[in-house]
Amino acid sequence: ALQPIALNQELYGKLRAEAYKEKGNQLFLLQHYDLAIAEYLKALYANPAYTDPYYNLGKIYTITGDDRRAVEAYRRLLLINPGDHEVRTMMADRLVTMGRYDDALGQYDAVLGMEPGFDPAKRKRGYLENQRLALRDPQAANARFNRASQENLAQAKGLLTTYYRQSHHGEAIGLLGTLAF
């Protein structure tokens, strides 16, 4: 007889957490960050295993420049869902901003271990490695950067050519607009 009550309490906690999160999202959109944070914390109190509030807290802390709290929010989310490579990449980005380069590289490596083709982590890791190389050997870093730029340009050209040949002219033109040199 106790089990249905426990299930109802669990469901009630999840529903309350969702309601708090949604209110937090509305406040987030209005840029009332302190109030949004309070709602996300209420959501976590109602359901500590709910990852969405941690994600949103990380975003707010990133926007407000509180990288330490952003990393902590992402770390807690990753305790619940360690395979979230996007969040792990965002956490690594915050670690870079904090000057914790070795920790950031470790996170990028963890992402690439899970998702070897995850381009944001691959590019950011390469950029960070090149920045570190530039401190020791600026000429080597410049040569590596130029090589990577040429490879990226060749990949972009190949993608544009493929789109164009397949009569996806609009997509090809759209891609041209996003290229940065």
Image (spheres, helix red, strand yellow):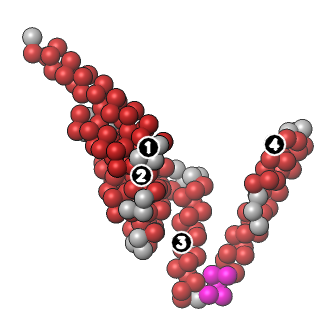
Q: Which mark is residue 171?
A: 4
Secondary structure beneath dot 3 equals helix
Q: Which residue is mark 2?
A: 60
Looking at the image, is mark 2 or mark 1 nearer the viewer? 1
Is 70 rendered above or below residue 138?
A: above
Q: Is residue 16 left or right of residue 122?
A: left
Mark 1 near mark 3, Cβ–Cβ under 8 Å? no
> Where's residue 154, x and y in %?
79, 62
> Where's residue 134, x and y in %?
58, 84
Q: Is residue 160 left or right of residue 26?
A: right
For disc 4, the neighbor class at 10 Å (few under 14, some 14 to 19, many from 20) is: few
For disc 3, the neighbor class at 10 Å (few under 14, some 14 to 19, many from 20) is: some
Q: Which residue is mark 1?
A: 28
The Cα–Cα distance between marks 1 and 3, rounded to whole angstroms, is: 31 Å
The Cα–Cα distance between marks 4 and 2, rounded to whole angstroms, is: 33 Å
The stretch of residues the image draws in magenta is 138-142
